[in-house]
Image (cartoon, rainbow, N blue to C red):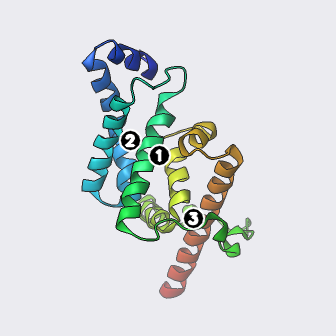
C-alpha cells in the first residue's frame, strides 16, 4: 500500500527528499496532461508542471496537512495555466453567463446515441475536437472529473467554486459535447448521402 500524500508531505517536512520525489512521480503526469490540454503547448505544460511543484515546495511551511493535497496541487496548476494563457492572449476566458441557449435544449432520446454510431477511434477524435472547442472553464471541470477522477467536492476546492457551480459547469459541458457530436454526425451523414 502506497503512503498517503499527507504522510509523504510530512516526511518531506522532516527532511526526506525521496518523499517529495514520490509525490512528484505520482502527480507530475496528471499535472502535465492537464496543462498540455489547457495550454496546447507541451513546453508551457512542462514549465507549469515544474512551477507547480516548486510552489508547493516554497509553501511547505504554510501547507495544511489536514486538508487533501490533490485539490491544492491542481489549484496551483490551474492558476498557473490561467496566468500563462492570460499572458498569451488578451481574452482567454469567456464569460460563464454568456453561454448560448441552444446548448441547453432537450435532445431526442429515442434516437440511437451518437457514440453508438461511431467507432471508438472516430468517437475519441471527435470528442477531443469538441472538448478543445469548449470554453476553458468547461474543459477544466471535465478534465478534473473524468481525466483526474476528482469528486465534485474536490473540483470545487480546486477551482474555488461553489459545488453547485461545478455541477452546472459539468452538466453544460456534457450538453455542449453531446450537441456538437450530434451536429457533426448529422453533417457527416448528409455529406455521405
Q: Are marks 2 and 1 in contact (CB under 8 Å)?
A: yes
Picture quarter containing residue 103?
A: bottom right
Q: Report helix, strand or loop for mark 2.
A: helix
Residue 177, label in figure: 3
Name the spot of residue 19 as percent of width and height, x first. 31, 19
Residue at image mark 2: 30
Q: How crowded is mark 1: few (under 14 residues within 10 Å), some or many (20 or more)?
A: few
State how far apart marks 2 and 3 are (Cα): 22 Å
Crowd rating for badge 2 (residues with CA inside 10 Å; few <14, some 14–19, many 20+)? some
Mark 3, Cα crowd under 10 Å, few <14 / some 14-19 / many 20+, is many
N-terminal label among 1 and 3:
1
In the picture, measured across the screen, residue 123 lies left or right of residue 111, that is left
Name the front one of labels 2 and 1: 2
> Looking at the rendered structure, which numbered label has been put on residue 147?
1
Q: Which of marks 2 and 3 is nearer the N terminus?
A: 2
Query: Where's residue 49, x and y in %?
Result: 32, 43
Q: Which numbered disc flags the more N-terminal residue, 2 or 1? A: 2
Residue at (64, 63) in percent of width and height: 175
Label 1, secondary structure: give it. helix
Q: Looking at this view, is 99 or 53 the one in front?
A: 53
Q: Cα distance, mark 2 to mark 1? A: 8 Å
Q: Is mark 3 on a helix, strand or loop?
A: helix
Which residue is rendered at x = 63% and y = 37% of the image?
A: 153
Q: Distance between the residues labelled 1 and 3?
A: 15 Å
Classify 193 as above or below 144. Answer: below
Res. 46 in view: yes
User: Could you say where residue 157 lies in the image, as x and y percent from the top left?
Assistant: 58, 39
Q: Is residue 193 something that shows in the picture?
A: no
Task: Name the quarter where the N terminus is drawn.
Answer: top left
Residue 166 lies left or right of residue 73; in this view the side is: right
Amino acid at each position: 500500500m502506497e503512503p498517503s500524500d499527507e504522510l509523504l508531505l510530512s516526511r518531506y517536512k522532516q527532511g526526506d527528499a525521496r518523499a517529495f520525489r514520490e509525490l512528484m512521480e505520482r502527480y507530475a503526469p496528471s499535472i502535465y496532461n492537464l496543462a498540455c490540454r489547457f495550454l496546447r503547448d507541451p513546453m508551457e505544460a512542462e514549465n507549469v508542471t515544474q512551477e507547480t511543484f516548486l510552489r508547493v515546495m516554497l509553501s511547505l511551511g504554510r501547507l495544511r496537512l489536514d486538508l487533501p493535497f490533490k485539490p491544492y496541487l491542481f489549484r496551483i496548476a490551474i492558476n498557473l495555466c490561467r496566468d500563462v494563457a492570460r499572458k498569451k492572449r488578451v481574452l482567454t476566458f469567456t464569460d460563464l453567463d454568456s453561454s448560448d441557449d441552444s446548448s441547453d435544449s432537450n435532445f431526442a432520446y429515442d434516437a440511437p446515441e451518437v457514440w453508438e454510431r461511431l467507432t471508438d477511434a472516430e468517437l475519441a477524435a471527435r470528442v477531443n475536437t469538441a472538448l478543445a472547442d469548449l470554453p476553458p472553464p468547461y474543459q477544466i471541470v471535465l478534465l478534473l472529473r473524468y481525466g483526474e477522477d476528482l469528486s465534485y467536492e474536490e473540483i470545487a476546492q480546486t477551482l474555488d467554486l461553489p459545488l453547485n457551480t461545478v455541477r452546472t459547469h459539468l452538466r453544460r459541458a456534457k450538453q455542449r459535447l453531446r450537441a456538437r457530436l450530434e451536429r457533426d454526425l448529422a453533417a457527416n451523414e448528409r455529406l455521405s448521402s
